[in-house]
Amino acid sequence: MGLLTGKTALITGASRGIGKAIAEKFAEEGANLILTDLFYDDQAKNLEEKLNQMGVKAKMYASDASKFADAQRVVEEALKDFERIDILVNNAGITRDNLLMRMTEEQWDLVINVNLKSVFNLTKAVQGTMLRQRSGSIINMSSVVGVSGNAGQANYSASKAGMIGFTKTIARELGSRNIRCNAIAPGFILTEMTEKLSEEVRKEWAEKIPMKRGGSTEEVAKVALFLASDLSSYVSGQVIQVCGAMLT
């Protein structure tokens, strides 16, 4: 349909999982793509080549989204290559699960920095160009555990809840410049991360979900497409849960 033709999107954590699915969906709809991940490995290179073969311009940058200076650097480089940024998807994220009594300071700091500080870093870095364009869509990848909490994930839940507060604030701050900011809160999504779980554990999770299955990365990507495109031109400051009614 070409919903994103003529637009350029920056996606963090783009070489696998949900980030990869969003990149592919955006490319199908005509977006040029600025992709970042911690390393420019074979998986990142293969995705970059695949997207370019789809007829859009795509480039992968090695960048640590948790580092403020690195976020500024990659955006400056990307603007030289692409000239504009219309869409930002803050997708970079990790887990270091543990009960609070066993959680180390390092586990706490690492998850907060990668998941939450990266959202500040990249949003701050792209804000100037979006303000000059007087348009933009920022999409923050939160989680249902940022809404509900989850035992053994104090660091992850806190980071994802922080993203929701940040989303609502930025929507208020930048709305007058036609810049929208929304969050997606996925539930149990089948990714490389969940594939590491045993089949028994995956079945137990599925039984807790009213739709009786995990979601796909493409289903999350379709919601990201809606928020990135003009279909959602009057949607801002919202959290859309993609969880099969696991959290209602």
Image (spheres, rainbow, N blue to C red):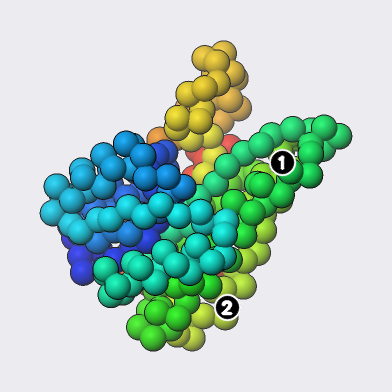
- Percent position (x, y) of residue 220? 42, 45
Task: State the mark number for residue 107.
Answer: 1
Q: Is residue 213 above or below residue 220?
A: above
Q: In this view, does 21 lie above or below 168?
A: above
Residue 222 in view here: no
Q: Is mark 2 on a helix, strand or loop?
A: helix
Name the residue at 62% across, 39% down: 95
Name the residue at 33% across, 42% down: 44
- Percent position (x, y) of residue 116? 62, 56
Distance of mark 2 from mark 1, alpha carbons? 32 Å
Q: Which amino acid does label 1 sit on?
A: Gln
Q: In which quarter of the image is the N terminus?
A: bottom left
- Percent position (x, y) of residue 156? 67, 44
State which mark lies toward you, 2 or 1: 1
Q: 99 or 179: which is nearer to us?
A: 99
Residue 9 in view here: yes
- Percent position (x, y) of residue 67? 57, 59
Mark positioned earlier in the residue sequence (2 or 1): 1
Q: Is residue 139 left or right of residue 198?
A: left
Task: State the mark number for residue 67.
Answer: none
Name the residue at 47% across, 76% down: 127
Residue 9: name its quadrant: bottom left
Q: In which quarter of the image is the C terminus?
A: top right
Q: Is residue 41 left or right of residue 32?
A: right
Near mark 2 (Cα within 10 A), the count class, few <14, some 14-19 or many ≥20, is: some
Q: Which amino acid does label 2 sit on?
A: Arg
Q: Looking at this view, name the residue that lies furthest to the right.
A: 101
Residue at the spot of label 2: 172
